Image (spheres, rainbow, N blue to C red):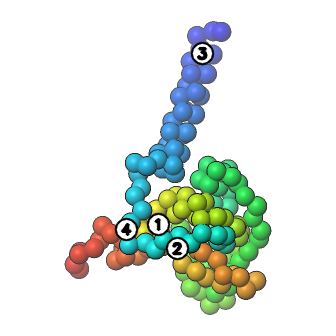
């Protein structure tokens, strides 16, 4: 192999390792997230989760949960997607997907979304009538780092 080709292969390998390291650190590592104590215990059994962002991508769900899972189209009326969150909007509709997960997978989704730090998990009614967990961005006032802050 020529030196230039070896350099390209090594650079690609290093980039792949960096991406895999980042994925592990942010989604699976015990070092970057500790579930806040005030969060309720996760009930055993099946949970329906409505996903509308990166979790719509099967490879992301596979890395986060350990499987891609089967999803089905779902939507929520009366909201619109605004950046990383949903906001109430008369006549709005957010398209996404519903996925059924077990308690351990829900815990891994909570880790990915940094439940209690960046997002809260709230029950919402899907257009088909089912209740599903939905991750919603926490306001600055709800976030732990802003506790005790004054305006």
Q: Position of residue 117 (x, y in %)?
A: 40, 66
Which of discs 3 and 1 lies nearer the camera? The answer is: 1
First reached walking from the N terminus: tag 3 or tag 4: 3
Verify CB contact (< 8 Å) between mark 1 and mark 2: yes
Query: What label does residue 121 carry, if any?
Result: 2
Q: In the depicted view, which residue is nearer to us: 96 or 28?
A: 28
> Where residue 50 sits in the image (x, y, percent)?
65, 72
Residue 90, given in percent of the width and then of the height, sits at 62, 90
Q: Give the SS element for disc 4.
A: loop
Residue 9 shows in the view: yes
The quarter holding residue 43 reads bottom right
The residue lying toward the viewer, choosing from 34 and 12, is 34
Label whose residue precedes the other's in the sequence (1 or 2):
1
Q: Secondary structure at mark 2?
A: strand
User: Tag 3, which secondary structure?
Assistant: helix
- Distance in Å between CA atoms under marks 1 and 4: 11 Å
Label 3 vs 1, first from the N-terminus: 3
Q: Which mark is residue 115?
A: 1
Instruction: Name the residue carrying label 4.
Output: 37
Q: CA distance from mark 3 to mark 4?
A: 49 Å
Residue under label 3: 6
Distance from label 2 to label 4 (Cα)?
15 Å
Give the residue drawn at x 42%, y 69%.
Answer: 116
The answer for how far apart the CA atoms under marks 3 and 1 are is 43 Å
């Amino acid at each position: 192999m020529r030196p230039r080709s070896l350099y390209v292969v090594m650079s690609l390998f290093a980039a792949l390792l960096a991406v895999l390291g980042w994925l592990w650190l942010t989604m699976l590592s015990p070092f970057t997230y500790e579930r806040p104590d005030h969060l309720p215990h996760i009930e055993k059994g099946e949970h329906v989760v409505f996903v509308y962002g990166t979790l719509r991508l099967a490879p992301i769900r596979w890395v986060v949960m350990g499987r891609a899972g089967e999803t089905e189209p779902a939507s929520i009326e009366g909201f619109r997607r605004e950046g990383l969150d949903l906001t109430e909007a008369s006549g709005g509709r957010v398209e996404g997907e519903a996925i059924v997960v077990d308690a351990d997978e829900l815990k891994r989704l909570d880790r990915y979304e940094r439940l209690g730090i960046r997002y809260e998990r709230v029950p919402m009614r899907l257009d088909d009538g089912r209740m599903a967990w939905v991750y919603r961005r926490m306001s600055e006032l709800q976030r732990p780092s802003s506790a005790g802050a004054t305006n």
